[in-house]
Image (spheres, grey):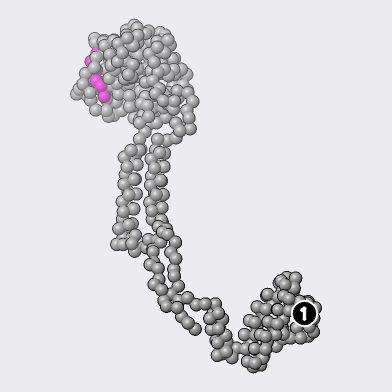
Amino acid sequence: MTVAPPREAAASVPVSPTARSMWRGGRGIAVIGALILLVSVVTVLFTGTSTEGRPLDPADTTLNGSKALAEILRRQGVRVERVTSVEEAVRLDGPDRLMLISAVPQLFDPAAARALAATRADRLLVGAIPSMEEFGAGITLKERTSVRSREPRCDLPAAALAGGAYIGGATYSVPRGGVTCYPDDLGPSLARVTGARTVTAVGDGAFMSNQRLAEDGNAALAINLAGARPVLIWLVPPDETPGSPGAGTASLVDLLPRGIPWAVLQLGVAVLLVALWRVRRLGPVVVERLPVVVRAAETVEGRGRLYRARRARGQAAAALRAASVARLTPRLGLNADATPEQIAAIAAARTGREPTWVRAVMFGPPPSDDAGLVALASHLDTLERQVREP
C-alpha cells in the first residue's frame, strides 16, 4: 500500500475559554463577588428603606403621611377636606371649621397668606409657618428645639388629657392671655390664643404621622387638636405627578414601587455576569487536514488481506453477499423487507438461471477454501451483470 507523504496539520484554534484561564487563582470569582456587592450597596444607598412620601398628607399611607389620623377623624364624624391650594381652602371657609396649615410653599406668597388670614375658621398651625405674623394671632416664632417625648405641663384640656407626646421643633411666644404647653429651656412647643377665632400652633407635626401616631399620647393629642370642629380643612402642597395622592388616575408605571427600577437593574447586572461566566468564544471553522491520504482501492485491498491473514472466509463471503443483495434488491423491484426466497426467485426469472443455483450463490453456505471464495465473487459479479443487462 502506497502511503502519501504526510502533510502538516492545520494549526489548532481554541474555540472556548478554559476554566483555568477564567478562574486562575480564584480571581474571576472574586471579581464577580465584588461587582454583586457593589450593585447591592448602590441599590441600598439609592433606595434603602425610604418612606419619605408626602409629610402630613391625609391621603398618604407612608410613615410620614397622616392617612391614619384622617381615617380616625372621619370615623368620629369629622369631615376631612384635603385641599391643595389656598383658593380651595378659602372657598371652604366657615365659622364652624378648622383649618390645618403646615409649612406649604403657597404661604411664601404674601397674597395667599393674606387670603388665609382673612378666613373665619379656627387654625391649627404645624411647624415653622412662613408669614406667621399674618395669621398667627400674635403667636411668634422663637428658636428650634429637639423633637422628643415631652410632658404637657399646662392646663389646656387638649394637651392635659393626652399626656406625654412626641413634640418639639419650633418654639413660640404668645401674647397676654395665651396658653403654652410642652415647654423646655428654649420655650414651649404648643401655643394657643383664643379670640375671634382659636389659633393653635405646634412646633412639629411628627406626632400626627402614621409612624408616631400610636406612641405616647400622640393619637389623643392629634385628635383633640385636629378634631375640634365638625369640618377639618387640611391644606397640603400641590400634587406634582399623576401618581400623587388625590391627583386622579395613575398609570401602571406610577403604581410601581420606587425600588423596582433598581431591582431590575441589579437583576440585569447579575444576568450579565452569569452570561460572561458562561460565554463561549466561537472562532472560525477549523479544517483539519488528514496526515495520510489513502485511495479507496487500497482500503479494499487492505481489508481483503486482513480477511486472508485471519482465514475469515465466512466473514468475507457474508460481506460480498450482503453488498450484492443490497445492489440487486432495488433493481429487482423489491424493498428491503423482501425474503431470500423472493429475491432468488425473481433474480432467477430475470436471468434465466435455475432458482436453486441463484439461491446457493446469494444465500448459500460459506466457501471452504480460497478458491471457493474467488468463485463465489465471480458468480455474484456475473449474476449482477445479468440482472442489469438481461
Give residue 242's position: percent from left, percent from top: 44, 25
- Range shown magenta: 169-174
Decide: is 60 above or below 141: below
Residue 195 on the magenta segment = no
Residue at image point 37% right, 31% down: 63
Q: Can see residue 107?
A: yes
What is the crowding at mark 1: few (fewer than 14 residues within 10 Å), some, or many (at least 20)? Answer: some
Decide: is 284 above or below 345: above
Give residue 298's position: percent from left, percent from top: 53, 81
Q: Say which quadrant the C terminus sits in.
A: bottom right
Residue at image point 31% right, 13% down: 109
Q: Which residue is mark 1?
A: 351
> Is 229 on the left or on the right of 333, as rendered?
left
Which SS type dominates the magenta stretch? strand
Work out whether residue 32 or residue 55 is closer to the camera in this orientation and state it. 32
Give residue 226's position: percent from left, percent from top: 38, 19
Give residue 285's position: percent from left, percent from top: 44, 61
Disc 1 marks which amino acid? Answer: Thr
Decide: is 389 above or below 305: above
> How many numbered discs?
1
